[in-house]
Amino acid sequence: MEEENPPIQAEEELPEPPVWIEVSTIEELCTAGGRADHIRLTADLTVSDPDLQFYTFWTPTTLDMNGHHIQIEEGGWLSFGGNTLSPLVMVGHSGEEGAFQVLPGGRLDLEDLDASQLTGLLARQAEGGCLVVSEVTAQPEQIAYAQAPVLYQLRASFAALPLGLSPEELAAQLPDPEVFVNYQGQMSSMLSVPAGRLSWDIQENWEDISAGRRTVLHARPNGPISGEGWPESELTPILFAPVTCELAILVDGAAIGQIIDHHTTYGSSYELYFLFPDRVRPEGLPLSEERGPACLEFSLNGGETWLSVAAGEEGLETNLLYAELYDERDKGSQEPYAQLGFYQMNVTFSVRAWADYQGEGYTFRLYTDTLTLSPEGVHIDPGIGGSRGGTVDLLPTPPDPPITETAPPEPVTAPTEDSNSPEPVSLPVEGQEASDPPVERSESPNEPADLAPHPAQTTPPDSQTQHTAVAPSPEKQPASTLPSPTVQVLAGTAVTVTLVTAAAATKPAALLNWLRRLFHKL
């Protein structure tokens, strides 16, 4: 009798081993974020860039530290984490000093990650470093916090003060800087540090200040800092970086305020602040009646050519940059604002703004100071504070009214054509060669004289024909442009113009640019 063969058992399918992506630089690690589900370090990494990000996005990720660490140096800022749908799990050994080491002046943001399977220390914060921890699964002993609170100024304060103040008067008018306090992994709400408790480097910069140049002041505490809302600690807070204040000296009443920059992998964006007086009085002319809409100008080649964006017009957007300016005073807002950004483009650029003031018989164009910034948003040449000067366009004096004859005019007999009559002769105009054709004068008495338009102005302002012209004083003859007249700000206070970044592009644009701007704002 034949024996029956036993049934063949199906072999169990074993899971395929994970494919580990090995990285040896911080750039490789950030690039792998959201693209690889298993990442292993093969070297110690260093962060010195002011804005680096590692996120899992839509890819659950396991990160093997493999005995290595990530060190955040002074000036470096690393944002590191996952999310609920795509968790980040850290495994392996972190080494003796921790998986993350935050040095003085460096910042690390840890969020939404699981370090429960990590052997060793997760993070070590040095005194003067900044560490922010949110939704992190780890044992308390896995994080070594700094002992003293850290004062963190997100952006410099700003002051626009008149020329001629003494050092003591200037110090007394500096604003109180606003800071965060980083302590035990948390950031406090915004707190103010009394400017009088800080030692400012005014004397070191006095030559520039007294000359009216834009200056960035630095300060350190001159004693213990405490007050309501401060975390309880027996130690004096340590500055993450020196407290700074951007100082613009008002020469003619206008200045660019802070330029707040934000750098990401997708490019750089800038928020600008402007100061414009409500009304001005050019030298020898009456007080202006109103300020016109603002205009933003920026240059990418050292000021040889300028790109301009006017309020109320469509913004500028290319594959490399975008710029928008708003001035919605007709809607009750007195604060024009703008945005300026570059896609994947680190450039040195200059920026300024101007506005036209309408007066009785003149238009005055007032400029803010011009600032040049490096790709990192650092002032290259502070330049002169306040206005870069202005130009005055005088409206023409209306012609004298014709004299009305009381007696009836004598009848005029038309001359008979005579072949022997001499040909008419054209007399040369002053400064014109005799051979040139005669100059035709305008028939309209309200048409402006031959005014040289400003480079940023392609057409004369409409308002030049809306005012009654006045004759200039004898010592000030009519001219198309008067170089840099002295301007007095007599009415109203300077308006701070806050430039905020829009959440997304709303006008028609290429899809790629829209996505770039969307990621840029995140």
Image: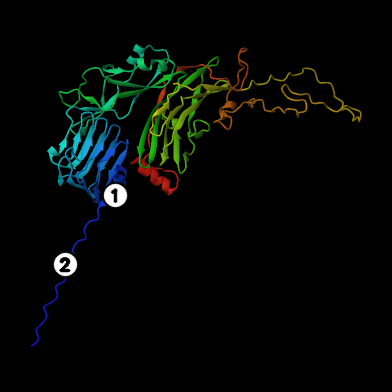
Q: Nearer the viewer, residue 267 or 503?
A: 267
Give whichever of 1, 234 is nearer the camera: 1
Report whether 503 appears left or right of 64: right
Rendered image quadrant of residue 272:
top left
Q: Amino acid at mark 2?
A: Glu
Question: Which tag is nearer the camera, tag 2 or tag 1?
Answer: 2
Residue neighbourhood size for the residue with mark 2, other residues' Cα within 10 Å, grouped as few (<14), some (14–19), many (≥20)? few
The image position of residue 96, as x and y in percent, is 16, 39
Q: x, y percentage for residue 444?
A: 67, 28
Q: Of 496 and 79, which appears nearest the observer? A: 79
- Which quadrant would the C terminus be assigned to in this image? top left
**Residue sitting at 25 percent across and 37 percent down?**
71
Q: State left or right for residue 86 relative to residue 156.
A: left
Disc 2, SS: loop
Residue at image point 50% right, 30% down? 303
Q: Are marks 2 and 1 in contact (CB under 8 Å)?
A: no
- Kindly identify the residue that appears in the image at 45 percent across and 42 percent down: 320
| Image point (21%, 60%), residue name | 16
Query: Is 505 situated above or below 242?
Result: below
- Which is nearer the N-term, disc 2 or disc 1? 2
Checking the image for residue 34, the label placed there is 1
Residue closest to the far bottom: 1
Neighbour tally class for label 1: few under 14, some 14-19, many 20 plus, Cα within 10 Å: some
Mark 2 lies on residue:
12
The image position of residue 355, as x and y in percent, is 49, 27
* Of residues 321 and 52, the one drawn nearer to the viewer in this rendering: 52
Could you tell me how far apart the alpha carbons at marks 2 and 1 are, in whole angstroms?
32 Å
Where residue 311 sits: x, y (%)? 47, 33
